[in-house]
Image (spheres, grey):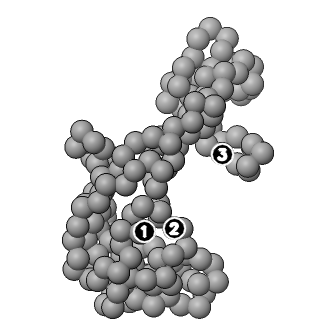
């Protein structure tokens, strides 16, 4: 069976940056399960998986445009600390959920100076190449429930 739209796929993966540092991996965990063709994973990785079969192992470099997007300097904003009521100490690296015109968004604190806090709404991996090592573990047809939800709801029984 080949990976194509509406197939549930399980993969093992390791994600590294251009310097070879591991950013994320499924090693020591269950393989990642997703529904092909439903934007459950980044576009570049989904495209690279199309047509693969169980046991296929490969490396793929995903450019920012096909990953988490190019870095957008306009998504950084400096605010007064008083906008963070109820937070005792604001530190670089903290993340907050904020309501934006695009819905709920996660922002990261990137700088704190005196009474100002600079936040960044870019994804932490925006603007970076993503280097994946992937092995296809299982493929199966999606259930009607998974298709209606557009995501995997159940484990792959027995795999294929």
Q: Residue at x 45, y 40 (%)?
A: 127
Residue topped by disc 1: 46
- Secondary structure, mark 1, is helix
Residue topped by disc 2: 40
* Quadrant of the rendered image containing residue 134: bottom left
Instruction: Residue lying at the far right in this picture: please name it.
Output: 101
* Quadrant of the rendered image containing residue 120: top right
Which of discs 3 and 1 lies nearer the camera? The answer is 1
Query: Mark 1 packing: few (<14 Cα in 10 Å), some, or many (20+)?
Result: many
Find out whether the residues at labels 1 and 2 contact each other: C-beta distance under 8 Å.
yes
* Quadrant of the rendered image containing residue 159: bottom left
Specify which label sits upstream in the sequence, 3 or 2.
Answer: 2
Q: How many marks?
A: 3
Q: Which residue is drawn at 35% across and 81% down?
A: 51
Which of discs 1 and 2 lies nearer the camera? The answer is 1
- Secondary structure, mark 3, is strand
- Placement of the N terminus among the 4 image quadrants: bottom left
| Alpha carbon separation for disc pair 3 and 1 | 24 Å
Q: Which residue is drawn at 50% across and 84% down?
A: 6
Specify which label sits upstream in the sequence, 1 or 2.
Answer: 2
List x then y, in percent, for residue 12: 29, 68
List x then y, in percent, for residue 142: 50, 88
Q: Can residue 42 be seen in this view?
A: yes
Query: Mark 2 packing: few (<14 Cα in 10 Å), some, or many (20+)?
Result: some
Q: Which of 92 and 86 is in front in this view?
A: 92
- Placement of the C terminus among the 4 image quadrants: bottom left
In the figure, is residue 142 to the left or right of 63?
A: right
- Secondary structure, mark 2, is loop
Q: Nearer the viewer, residue 19 or 44?
A: 44
Q: Which residue is drawn at 29% across and 83% down?
A: 53
| Alpha carbon separation for disc pair 3 and 2 | 18 Å
Residue topped by disc 3: 105
């Amino acid at each position: 069976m080949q990976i194509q739209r509406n197939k549930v796929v399980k993969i093992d993966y390791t994600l590294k940056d251009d310097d070879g540092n591991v950013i994320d991996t499924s090693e020591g965990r269950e393989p990642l399960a997703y529904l092909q063709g439903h934007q459950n994973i980044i576009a570049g990785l989904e495209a690279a998986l199309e047509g693969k079969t169980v046991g296929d192992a490969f490396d793929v470099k995903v450019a920012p445009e096909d990953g988490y997007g190019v870095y957008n300097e306009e998504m950084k904003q400096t605010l007064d600390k008083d906008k963070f009521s109820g937070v005792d100490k604001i530190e670089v690296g903290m993340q907050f959920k904020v309501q934006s015109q695009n819905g709920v968004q996660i922002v990261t604190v990137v700088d704190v100076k005196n009474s100002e806090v600079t936040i960044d709404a870019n994804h932490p991996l925006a603007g970076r190449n993503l280097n994946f090592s992937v092995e296809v573990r299982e493929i199966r047809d999606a259930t009607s429930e998974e298709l209606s939800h557009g995501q995997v709801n159940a484990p792959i029984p027995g795999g294929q």
